[in-house]
Amino acid sequence: MTKTFLPSVKEVETTRKWHHIDATGQTLGRLATQIAVLLMGKHKKTYTPNMDCGDFVVVTNAGKVKLTGKKLEQKVYFSHSGYAKGGKETPVKRVLENNPTRVLELAVKRMLDENKLRAPRMKRLRLFAGEEHSFTERFGK
């Protein structure tokens, strides 16, 4: 009979690694899935769905992410205030101009499960619009 292995919280915290991803020219959806897998820890053999066993992810050049097809003109983000006629649509082109990291952040956030583990996973994601970031000591650059 096989036994289920559950990693301890201390073991999970000490084995977290740092991953650096350059988003230049990469497709938004494919990059977001790659990041979501790293944040959840699904790439590890000790993956447990009810534990937060993912790694840290640093993404540079998030503003240079690529959208395929006509998404740059047609894709919109919808938000609602809760009031009557409180809906607001924002084109992805405007979001990329104002806050280039927001597009990738929303894509990754919406790929993670909507539960108590999503907030700590998103805290381990660091997005930078340009090449410079404050985590150079982690990667030896």
Image (tube, helix red, strand yellow):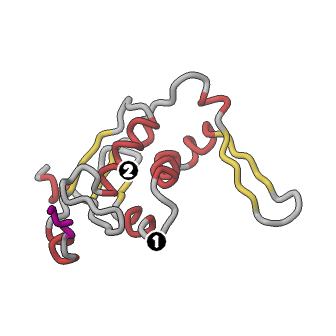
Residue closer to the observer: 5 or 15: 5
Crowdedness near tag 2: few (<14), some (14–19) or many (≥20) residues, C-alpha within 10 Å: many
Type of amino acid at the residue the image marks with label 2? Ala
Q: Which corner quadrant of the image does residue 57 belong to?
A: bottom left
Image quadrant containing the N terminus: bottom left
Q: Position of residue 76 (x, y in %)?
A: 67, 40
Type of amino acid at the residue the image marks with label 1? Lys
Residue closer to the observer: 53 or 141: 53
**Label number found at residue 36:** 2
Q: Distance between the residues labelled 1 and 2?
A: 15 Å
**Label number found at residue 116:** 1
**Residue drawn at (76%, 52%) of the image:** 88
Residue sitting at the far top: 69
Residue closer to the observer: 131 or 75: 75
**Residue drawn at (41%, 43%) of the image:** 32
Q: Can residue 65 be seen at all in this image of the molecule?
A: yes
**Residue drawn at (41%, 46%) of the image:** 129
Q: Where is residue 101 in the image (x, y as percent from the top left)?
A: 47, 49
